[in-house]
Image: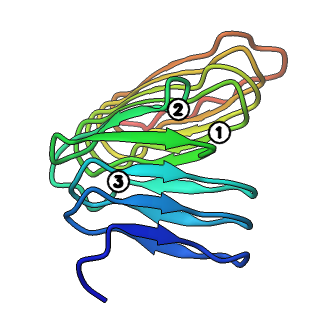
Amino acid sequence: MRNLEDIIGTPFEDILVGNEKDNRIWALESNDLLVGNAGNDSFYGGEGIDVLSYRRDPNGVTVNLQTGDAIDGWGNRDRIADIENVAGSTHDDNITGDDTVNVITGDAGSDRIYGLGDDDKLYGEFGEDEIYGGEGGDSIYGNQDRDTLTAKRVETTSEVAMPTT
């Protein structure tokens, strides 16, 4: 199919991929993967646990689930609603969660990741990342690169593995 601008998912698990146009993508029910590509896109997650992926973007992205705003890797503005999880690009990203449970993955690049509220899982992956937990009981994962991990509140034993040189 070509020249589509709007995509509506099914009640089942969907992979919904936009094109270079300004897309409106509705995930509906279930756990879905949404990918916008270029264009000023609007993403509506709906029921289930949904992932918004920017992995294919040619440059770093800025995503804020709290405000519902994003700038994709093409420099376009995206709108976000009812999305729980974000997968960043392979470049330097700035990703902020919201007050619900989020899984945020930075991928490659030197990323800044902010968890905000609830019990988040925050993954820096490759690159020199800065990862900040929020109010909840977050799980924060760096990598073998020089990462900065900041926890708001530590109530249990923390485990830090440092590579030997």
Q: Which residue is mark 3?
A: 54
Q: Which residue is mark 2?
A: 65
Q: Quadrant of the N terminus?
A: bottom left
- Nearer the viewer's eye, disc 2 or disc 3? 2
Mark 1 vs 3, N-terminal side: 3
Inspect the image, locate mark 1, and give the three-letter code of the amino acid beneath it.
Answer: Asn
x and y percentages locating residue 83 in the rendered image? 59, 46
Q: Is residue 68 left or right of residue 27?
A: left
Q: Which mark is residue 102?
A: 1
Inspect the image, locate mark 2, and give the three-letter code of the amino acid beneath it.
Answer: Leu
Residue ID at (36%, 30%): 129
Question: Which quarter of the picture shows residue 158?
Answer: top right
Which element carries disc 2, helix, strand or loop? Answer: loop
x and y percentages locating residue 86 in the rendered image? 50, 46
- Residue 126 is at least partly visible in this image: yes
Inspect the image, locate mark 3, and give the three-letter code of the amino acid beneath it.
Answer: Tyr
Q: Residue furthest top?
A: 152
- Nearer the viewer's eye, disc 2 or disc 1? 2
Q: Which mark is residue 150?
A: none
Q: Quadrant of the C terminus?
A: top left
Which element carries disc 1, helix, strand or loop? Answer: loop
**Tags 2 and 3 in contact by the CB under 8 Å rule?**
no
Q: Is residue 86 positioned above or below 62 on the image?
A: below
How crowded pointer 3 is (Cα within 10 Å; few <14, some 14-19, many 20+) is rated as many
Q: Is residue 90 positioned above or below 77 on the image?
A: below
Residue ID at (68%, 54%): 46
Give me the C-alpha separation between circle 2 and circle 3.
14 Å
Residue ID at (56%, 30%): 97
Q: Nearer the viewer, residue 41 or 155?
A: 41
Give me the C-alpha separation between circle 1 and circle 3.
16 Å
x and y percentages locating residue 124 in the rendered image? 44, 39
